[in-house]
Image: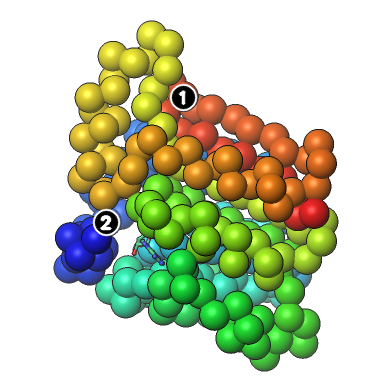
Amino acid sequence: MTRVFRRYGVGARWYDVLSGERVVYGVGRRVGIGMLDLSPGDVVIDLGCGTGLNFPLLARAVGPEGLIVGVDRSGDMLAQARRRAQWLPCEVVLVEADAAELDVHALAGVIAEQTGRDRADALVTTYALSVMRGGAEEAWTRAAGLVCSGGGLLVVDMQPPVGVWRIFSPLARLACAFGGADIRLRPWRFVRPVAERDSVRGVAMRGGHVVAVAARRA
Ligand SMILES: C[S@@+](CC[C@H](N)C(=O)[O-])C[C@H]1O[C@@H](n2cnc3c(N)ncnc32)[C@H](O)[C@@H]1O
């Protein structure tokens, strides 16, 4: 766990170039965030936001009246996210916290301070729950408790490629090991228990390696 923490500490400033964003992982956030149907003025929590690679897409969707609340336990990743946020048209609040021990009342307070209401319209987490490993379900469930009924839920994460794409499995495993991610966690299974019946939709990309699952909060 300590090694994972350092990876997103001193390594934070190289994360964007080393993360395989253009070739493999960028498509997951683009497709996933598109599945959320966000509206101008929405409040979105980005759990395990890292350097804020989701922020430009989220900001475009929620507009100048919207709010992004980025949560990450790495101050170094958040420092990169803060740099990115200063160019965005919407308000961004960054919270340094371990998501598995997230103080939901404090986070509700942060949202209320900015918006006058204490619920978010959507929760997004991309490539982060697999890094949280044993704490992932607790982290997801706590944060999902802050989303209003009917609000958007999105998990984008990784699994071993499927079908003929299995030839790329060693590469996928290497990428996940490099990032400290558990490629077998399949964290999108945490969505259904907190989602409205029949609202769960999923898409697999890049030979099944990248999976996006979206739903509405029950
Ligand atoms: C692979 S990065 C993904 C970052 C970003 N979501 C993205 O799509 O590029 C994983 C992030 O999860 C964060 N993280 C890992 N465990 C965490 C925890 N328990 N609480 C909060 N953040 C955590 C790391 O600091 C890192 O920034």
The amino acid beneath tag 1 is Gly
Rendered residue at 42%/11% (across/down):
163
Rendered residue at 37%/72% (across/down):
73
> Toward the viewer: 88 or 119?
119
Q: Is residue 148 visible?
A: yes
Numbered mark located on residue 15 in the image = 2
Rendered residue at 25%/65% (across/down):
5
Rounded to the nearest angstrom, the CA distance separating label 2 from label 1 is 23 Å
> Toward the viewer: 191 or 150?
191
Residue identifier under label 1: 208
Assign a secondary structure to mark 2: helix
Quarter of the view holding residue 173: top left
**Vertical comparison of 103 with 194: above or below:** below
Residue 137 locus on image (x, y percent): 52, 55
| Mark 2 Cα-neighbour bin, 10 Å: few <14, some 14–19, many ≥20 | some
**Vertical comparison of 48 with 112: above or below:** above
